[in-house]
Amino acid sequence: MAILALGVLVSTFLMGLALGAPFIRLLRRLRIGKQIRREGPQSHLGKQGTPTMGGVLVIGVVALAMLAVFFALPSEHRGDYVAQTVAPFGALLAVGLLGAVDDYRNVVTGFGIHGRQKLVVQLIVALVGALYVQRHYGVTGIYVPLVGEWEIGAAAFVAIAVFAIVGFSNGVNLTDGLDGLAGGTLVFAFLSFAFIAAARGFPWLVVLCAALVGALLAFLWFNVQPAEVYMGDTGALAFGATLAVVALTTGFVLLLPLAGAIFVAVTGSVILQVGSYKLRGVRIFRMAPLQHHFELLGWPQEKVTIRFWLIGALAGIGAAVLAFATPV
């Protein structure tokens, strides 16, 4: 199974590299360009018009790889393959479609889907995914790192699951503000949960994580500073939701905030900034999300990105080690 996962990772990486340049040319031809917020850092205004919706490429490559694995498998293994991957893969497609509509409307009109409408769709997808994981695996507990399983009941699990899926979907979206930042951080998070899934006996979940890692690495080839393409909401919303569903399936949702520590910190910075300004009229950070605060302190974009990657890598390693040390 490890060889298969490695093969899938390499395959999605190579497919992404081969399709990346033609896909970017297509986006330019269709004038699918990024709309930069005027209230953001002034240094970002030069990125106006850079092709966006790069998440379509990643999702497409992952879908091709997962379908290829399905048809290559003997029929007796297909049931387990579908059972382990249908919830995260479904979240990837459903939330990716939501993000694609949002990106396209933003390109055409300058305004995306209204925040409340977007949240309703995210909640529906999250609820469906949470109910599937809970009912299919009969989950009534979650694993506490270093302690073991803690019984919480089906309803509490579903509530936690919905919160995690919606929270991480938006958390990754908030982090997607610098070239390569969200993509690189996602690579470490998915790698972490690939090892956790292997430890928990979910081999096909490992394959899905490997497919995502390979496709994201190929995307980063074109997304690192200076970016030739952005993932857009198509990718950011979808990858965050998928990461959360993967964590829920393994039972280690409590390790999700650690493996995704950067996404948690970025989301927290926005909540603190908005709350402080509304309650006290005082801004805690020079600008939120957090990555822009460091930009305005004088850190070059590359330094912010790489330092956040390093923290994400250490957090991912820590999450995997804690999972292996937890009795199951």
Image (cartoon, helix red, strand yellow):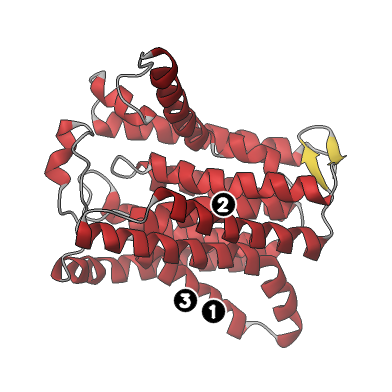
Q: Earlier in the sequence, mark 2 or mark 3?
A: 3
The answer to whether residue 138 is above or below residue 293 is below
Query: Would you name the residue on which mark 2 appears?
Result: 243
Left or right of 167, for residue 304: left
Q: Residues within 10 Å of mark 1 (few under 14, many from 20)?
A: few
In three-dimensional space, the C-alpha distance between marks 2 and 3, rounded to whole angstroms, equals 19 Å
Image point (15%, 32%), residue name: 42
Q: In the image shown, does 12 or 112 lie closer to the viewer?
A: 112
Check contact, mark 2 vs mark 3: CB within 8 A: no
> Amino acid under label 3?
Leu
Task: Judge depth for marks 2 and 3 and give the one in front.
Answer: 2
Return the residue at label 1: 67
10 Å crowding of disc 3: few (<14), some (14-19), many (20+): some
Quadrant of res 40: top left
- The type of residue carrying mark 1 is Leu
| Amino acid at the residue labelled 2 | Leu
The mark lying in front, picked from 1 and 2, is 2
Inter-mark Cα distance, 3 to 1: 5 Å
**Residue at the (65%, 57%) spot, across then down:** 127
Q: Secondary structure at mark 2?
A: helix
Q: Is residue 317 visible?
A: no
Relative to 268, is 225 on the left or the right?
left
Give percent across and percent down for residue 77. 73, 79
Residue 45, horizontal then vertical, whole percent = 14, 40
Residue 163 picture location, percent across and down: 62, 44
Q: In the picture shown, does residue 18 fall above or below 281?
A: below
Residue found at x 53% / y 33%: 261
**For numbered disc 1, what is the local secondary structure?**
helix
Residue assigned mark 3: 64
